[in-house]
Amino acid sequence: MEALTIKQYIDAINRTEDIVNKPKHYMLMDGLEVRDVLAALLMKMTTENIPSSVLFESDYVQMMQYLMRFMDKNGKQDLEKARWYLDKMINAYD
């Protein structure tokens, strides 16, 4: 069997993955998207006694996105980005 070129490999991935509507790094598992989890977490935040603002919620969403997709996207860099947003959230409590 002949080895694939990088272009052939990328083309094969793009044919099997819907990179616009369901990119792999936004799918936690079959049928469960990061977006679904975020919606549930934000709903819970509104029912709990958590100090909140649009910016706090935005930081939370960004942090959680990085945490949920670091394994399929940018690894350590995404964890560092999540920590940056977490620090902003912690400072909002001061």
Image (cartoon, rainbow, N blue to C red):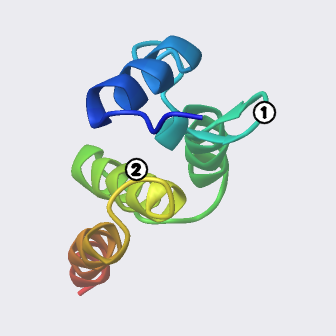
Query: How dense is the environment of label 1, judged by Cα within 10 Å: few (below 14), some, or many (20 and up)?
Result: few
Image quarter (top left, top right, bottom left or bottom right) of the N terminus: top right
Which mark identifies residue 53? Answer: none
Query: Mark 1: which secondary structure?
Result: loop
**What residue sits right under mark 1 in the picture?**
30
Above or below, 85 against 21 in this view is below
Image quarter (top left, top right, bottom left or bottom right) of the C terminus: bottom left
Above or below, 7 against 87 in this view is above
Q: Quadrant of residue 22?
A: top right
Residue 10 in percent (x, y) is at 36, 28
Discs 2/1, front: 1
Residue 16 in percent (x, y) is at 58, 17
Residue 26 in percent (x, y) is at 51, 37
User: What residue do we see at 55% from left, 44% from top?
Assistant: 42
Taking the view exactly as shown, the residue that stands out farthest to the right is 30
In front of the other: 62 or 18:
18
Q: Indicate which disc, 2 or 1, sits on the residue closer to the N terminus.
A: 1
**What residue sits right under mark 2 in the picture?**
61
Residue 21 located left or right of residue 1: left
In front of the other: 54 or 16:
16
User: What residue do we see at 48% from left, 28% from top?
Assistant: 23
Amino acid under disc 1: Asp
In front of the other: 36 or 92:
36
In front of the other: 92 or 23:
23
User: What residue do we see at 32% from left, 70% from top?
Assistant: 82
